[in-house]
Amino acid sequence: LLLICATPNSIIAQVSTYLDGKSYAIVLTMLSGGGGSSSTWVKDSFIFKSGKMYSSEIKKREGFKAAAYAPSNNGTNQNPIIKFAYETFNKYGSNLKIQGVAQGNFIEGTAQWTNKAGENLYTFTGTLME
């Protein structure tokens, strides 16, 4: 029984290490919205550190802080395909949700930024920063 309890924790810890310590240079494409400063969010860096994720540009510009991300490996240990989801709020009541997939040196996904001006939807692609 103790062995069963220990195994899931070690798997979760192992999955989170696939992205921890990595940073990706991101290019975003707006699909819909465009209210306020959200239309100028084109380039960014997504940083994964200590079980948390943040958007470098939006953290600086809009005050979205690092928050836990939920990773899962849909590949193998030799060829991980890491799906992740992240959600955070800033002090102005805006919400940022990012979902994506990282494989090798590449990352892609969607972002949803909801603020007082409305909802803004994006896709993003990026590469691992050395």
Image: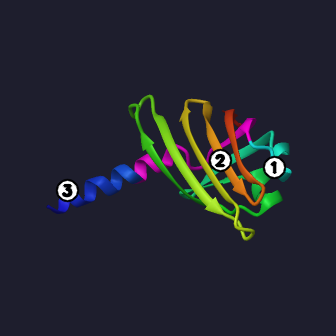
What is the spatial separation of the Cα atoms under label 2 and label 3, in whole angstroms?
37 Å
User: In the rendered structure, does residue 19 fall within the stretch colored magenta?
Assistant: yes
Q: Quadrant of residue 60?
A: bottom right
Image location of residue 29, percent across then percent down: 74, 34
Instruction: Label 1: state its secondary structure.
Output: loop
Residue type at mark 2: give it: Gln
Residue drawn 33% across and 57% down?
A: 9
Q: How is the image coloured?
A: rainbow
- What residue sits right under mark 2 in the picture? 112
- Report if the CB atoms under discs 2 and 3 are less than 8 Å apart: no
Image location of residue 77, percent across then percent down: 40, 34
Q: Is residue 10 left or right of residue 113?
A: left
What is the spatial separation of the Cα atoms under label 1 and label 3, in whole angstroms?
49 Å
Image location of residue 127, percent across then percent down: 68, 32
* Residue closest to the eye, 73 or 79: 73
The part of the chain drawn in magenta is 13-32
Q: Residues within 10 Å of mark 1 (few under 14, many from 20)?
A: some
- What residue sits right under mark 1 in the picture? 35
Residue type at mark 3: give it: Ile
Residue drawn 14% across and 61% down?
A: 1
Q: Quadrant of residue 43?
A: top right
